[in-house]
Image (spheres, rainbow, N blue to C red):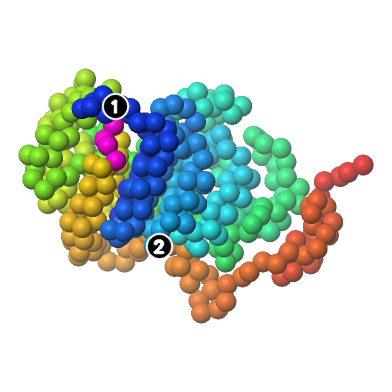
Amino acid sequence: MQFGIFSVSDISRNPVTGYTPSEAERIDASVRIAQRADEVGLDVFAIGEHHNPPFFSSSPTTLLSHIAALTKQITVSTAVTLLTTNDPVRIAEEYAMLQHLSKGRMDLMVGRGNTVPVYPWFGKDIRQGVPLVLDNYNLLHRLWREDVVDWEGEFRTALQGFTAIPRPLDDVPPFVWHGSIRTPEIAEQAAYYGNGYFANNILAPNLHFKPLVDFYRERFAHYGHGTAEQAIVGLGGHAFIAKRSQDAVEGFRPYFEGSPIYGTSYSLEEYMRSTPLSVGSPQEIIDKTLTFQEGFGSYQRQLWAIDAMGLPVEAALEQVELLGTEVVPVLRKEMEARRSPGVPDAPTHASLVRAKYGDGEPRRPRPNPNRGDNVTGTSPYQDSDPAIPARLPLIG
């Protein structure tokens, strides 16, 4: 079971002090939070992708590469990478580079995102959101598994004899999670490829996302990847922790009530009862998280948002400390003891390398000469099959 934190990269006014941090301050804070998460033994740090104020994470690969260089063991990921408005060729290249730089300590969560105007900003039509994400992932999947790709789809120019560089580390693609809270087609695609499915388990009533998770599990089994219980599921959450329950509630109240999303419409106590929001002592966070396992079944990844809504960085660092020292160690034992038989761990680069090579040596692709224009020759790498037919662009 993997435990970690994710950030949507919001820059929000602190409702207690009235102070709004700068972009520079929030970027620096996210790095400090990721470093502390690594130090206290959390497994994952994930960051969202946004292209508008009041957010800062427009380039997740840049930020995550920096974090990977400053940490020792934590896996860096996204929450989510916009597969609708990014070119899948660039995603293939940029995240393969991140995979190399992090020495495999990364994976990728893809999805549509939740910002409507981002589509026209990048020349896309929001009415094509679902077809875009399906088509683009189909191409991304191939780009990481085939040295030479011919492709003709609906939303980008055709590819002929194309090689995405660098090839994935050890010729093992990063593990992919498909994040969705409302789209069965995304759950279906995740199941088809045997990838992970992540439900963000916030901003909704308790177990609201169970039908989508159950659907993904059923389709995972349908496609022959294992039983429904063996499907790879991740859940989000939002937590605020203090040593004493009453201190957590009173400490979080001004941020909840000062939020334009929550405070004008809900009471904190009712929202805590009726949604996955976890506010309280370490034991109360543990108990609430165990209800996720009871409701959704055994799963592989739990991420919490802990730095949103204007919370100052010092308070966010305290949250990370409490998660890593008092909450997660207990959850590791409890959730392992309750895990259904045969449910696998979340895939990691190391486990995927073992599955592919056993005790053998991983592939290290070495390019052939004269491939700079993707026109000369049929084999891009010295160990590629020289008989690969190349349908290359016609030039004249």
Looking at the rendering, which quadrant does residue 263 occupy?
top left
* Quarter of the figure with the N terminus: bottom left
Count of numbered tags:
2
* Residue 112 magenta: no
Query: Percent from the top left, x then y, of residue 41?
Result: 30, 60
* Residue 311 magenta: yes
Q: Residue at x 49, y 43 (%)?
A: 60
Q: Residue at x 26, y 50 (%)?
A: 320
Taking 153 as reference, is 62 left or right?
left
Is 186 rendered above or below residue 68? above
Considering the numbered disc 1 on the image, is that residue within a helix, a strand or a loop?
loop
The span picked out in magenta is 309-313
Residue highlighted by disc 1: 19
How far, Cα to Cα, is label 2 from label 1?
33 Å
Taking 160 as reference, is 310 left or right?
left
Query: Percent from the top left, x then y, of residue 217?
Result: 37, 51
Other residues around mark 1 within 10 Å, as few (<14) / some (14–19) / many (≥20): few
Query: Percent from the top left, x then y, of residue 178?
Result: 44, 46
Image depth: mark 2 or mark 1 in front: 1
Query: Percent from the top left, x then y, of residue 376?
Result: 84, 56
The disc, 2 or 1, on the residue closer to the chain's N-terminal end is 1
Other residues around mark 2 within 10 Å, as few (<14) / some (14–19) / many (≥20): few
Q: Tell me the kind of residue under disc 2.
A: Lys
Taking 104 as reference, is 161 left or right?
right
Q: Tell me the kind of residue under disc 1.
A: Tyr
Q: Residue at x 59, y 64 (%)?
A: 171
Is 37 rendered above or below residue 47? below
- Pointers 2 and 1 in contact (CB under 8 A)? no
Residue highlighted by disc 2: 72
**Is the stretch drawn in magenta largely helix, strand or loop?**
loop
Is 116 rendered above or below residue 232? above
